[in-house]
């Protein structure tokens, strides 16, 4: 069942938002709307988080999510802040798992778009890779009451003590990943099984090329797909198991579309 936001039925702003102010700091973002955006049609929302060494513009390109949308969808690619060494970070040192700094950034994105555009609040999704995956994984627990689905590659998790609700998830993680070891990915999987109240039994599922297994029965409302991807090498032949495998964007959007 759709849950239209307050912005439904109202003309949208003349230009999409490119900066939000959160706790007094300007935060850049890329917001992408369908060419045929209609203010009377609730849109799914996908918020995608980049990793430690990439920009939001770079991940928009290689995540390759937009062309696989099968429903009216708005995509938002926020930019992180940087730490003292110039590295991308989504949290401040010493942040507690239940209050990472940029949970407020996600809240602001959801609030501003809900007020100004027609969002289906029942179809809010988060995506991430590497450091962005770890943040998205953590966000899915801390904001489980507003996030419908999570899809991530090669991430860990800073898990609050109590999650706000169940979230469907698709987790891709290469067993040979040295940057974020597979044990971290398994910890994320197990945390989500606990969050969603699922047993440890699983069945093979699509996409086969990622070796996916589904936890939860076939039509479960909040399944968890665990996909230990075998893709070790990039298209140029370089060994890099921490990569975003080819076809991941399509697989993630197909997973989101499967969630009624």
Image (spheres, helix red, strand yellow):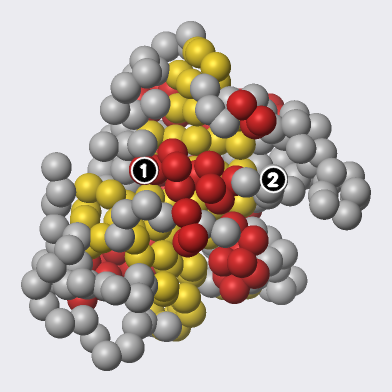
Q: Residue at x 14, y 42 (%)?
A: 1
Counting residues from the start of the chain, the first of labels 1 and 2 encountered is 2
Vertical placement of residue 111 versus 96, above or below: below
* Label placed on residue 84: none
Q: Classify residue 38 as left or right of residue 60.
A: left
Q: 149 or 34, which is in the foreground?
A: 34
| Farthest residue, direction left | 9
| Farthest residue, direction top | 201
Q: Classify residue 68 as left or right of residue 104.
A: right
Residue 212 occupies which quadrant of the picture? top right
Residue 256 on image: x %, y %: 39, 43
How many other residues sit within 10 Å of disc 2, few (<14), some (14-19) or many (≥20)? many
Q: Which residue is mark 1?
A: 257
Q: CA distance from mark 1 to mark 2?
A: 20 Å
How many other residues sit within 10 Å of disc 1, few (<14), some (14-19) or many (≥20)? some
Q: Classify residue 240 as left or right of residue 148.
A: right
Q: Which residue is mark 2?
A: 245
Q: Residue at x 41, y 73 (%)?
A: 32
Q: Residue at x 38, y 62 (%)?
A: 106
Residue 79 occupies which quadrant of the picture? bottom right
Residue 91 on image: x %, y %: 53, 60
């Amino acid at each position: 069942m759709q849950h239209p936001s307050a912005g439904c039925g109202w003309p949208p702003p003349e230009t999409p938002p490119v900066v939000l102010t959160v706790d007094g700091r300007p935060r850049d973002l890329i917001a992408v709307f369908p060419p045929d955006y209609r203010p009377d049609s609730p849109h799914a929302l996908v918020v995608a988080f980049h990793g430690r060494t990439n920009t939001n513009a770079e991940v928009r390109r290689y995540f390759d999510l937009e062309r696989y949308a099968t429903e009216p969808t708005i995509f938002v690619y926020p930019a992180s802040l940087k730490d003292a060494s110039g590295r991308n970070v989504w949290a401040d040192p010493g942040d507690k798992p239940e209050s990472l700094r940029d949970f407020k950034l996600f809240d602001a994105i959801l609030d501003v778009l809900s007020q100004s555009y027609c969002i289906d609040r029942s179809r809010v999704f988060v995506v991430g890779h590497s450091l962005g995956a770890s943040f998205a994984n953590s966000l899915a627990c801390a904001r489980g009451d507003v996030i419908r689905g999570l899809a991530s590659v090669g991430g860990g998790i800073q898990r609050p003590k109590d999650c706000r609700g169940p979230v469907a998830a698709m987790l891709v993680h290469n067993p040979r990943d040295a940057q974020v070891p597979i044990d971290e990915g398994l910890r994320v999987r197990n945390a989500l099984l606990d969050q969603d109240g699922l047993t440890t039994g699983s069945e093979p599922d699509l996409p086969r090329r990622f070796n996916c297994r589904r936890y939860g029965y076939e039509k479960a409302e909040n399944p968890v797909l665990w996909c230990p991807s075998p893709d070790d090498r990039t298209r140029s032949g370089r060994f890099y198991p921490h990569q975003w495998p080819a076809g991941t964007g399509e697989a993630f959007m197909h997973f989101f579309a499967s969630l009624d």
